[in-house]
Amino acid sequence: MKSNIFRYKQFSVVQDHAAMKVGTDSDLLGTLAAGGMRILDIGTGTGIISLMMAQRFPNARITAVEIDDDAVQDARVNFSASPFADRIELFHMSFQEYLQAHPEPVFDCVVCNPPYFDKSLECDNLGRARARHTFSLPFPVLVGGAYALLKEDGVFSVCIPPEVTDTFKTECLLTGFWLQDDYQVKALPQNPPKRYVLVHKKGKMIFPCVHTFCMRNEDHSRSEWYHQQLKDFLL
């Protein structure tokens, strides 16, 4: 059977086993997330976000955490085959287990494409259910854990849909984060935002910068902004 491979300029992503495949959310988070020297990728899946961050930040060391057995299979292959293999460490465990075993605030940056479905229908595929539903990683656990593992002035970046944006922002504020960048990304100019990439900062109070972008033009061609965002990645 032909392997399911997504090819980028500097690396490839095998996605034969992982329930969640490469998509728009990973492209947006991988290019808009804030970085640093020590990066934690929570729920790495195929490893795409870790690989994109490794390319964007050549001196960074990345820790990737993933609970799902099938996703870990793909991530291991993708990391070892990439030019960044010596800078990415993969932990096969839940974020809760990782947090308990490594509670020190050592990271400059945390990234996550979090599960956000709460009351939707159950999914027959356990891996897909874990990746999509908050029962596996509730917002308070995710936000509190990210806060605990970040150094002072560290940054926490996520990509989420509009229906949970206010809930997530509130949880971050209650935990002690301050919103730094609010990227509101539309599919088409006339549409409301389809995804939000939120960058929160640990530390002193700041005023957020709101950015509005569009992935496609009115004729559905790729926008110049989207082209520029992905030019270093897509073939």
Image (cartoon, grey):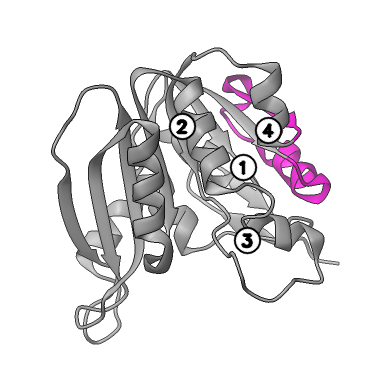
The location of residue 59, given as percent across then percent down, is: 42, 18
- Mark 3: few/some/many CA within 10 Å (<14, 14-19, 20+): many
Q: Which residues are magenta?
A: 67-93
Q: CA distance from mark 4 to mark 1?
A: 14 Å
Mark 3 lies on residue: 132
- Mark 2: few/some/many CA within 10 Å (<14, 14-19, 20+): many
The location of residue 35, given as percent across then percent down, is: 36, 30
Q: Nearer the viewer, residue 18 or 118?
A: 118
Q: Nearer the viewer, mark 1 or mark 2?
A: 2
Of the two numbered discs 2 and 4 on the same chain, state the one appearing first in sequence. Answer: 4
Of the two numbered discs 3 and 4 on the same chain, state the one appearing first in sequence. Answer: 4
Q: Residue 147 lies in what quarter of the image?
A: top left
Q: Nearer the viewer, residue 8 or 106?
A: 106
Mark 2 lies on residue: 110
Q: Nearer the viewer, mark 4 or mark 1?
A: 4
Under circle 1, the secondary element is loop
Mark 1 lies on residue: 44
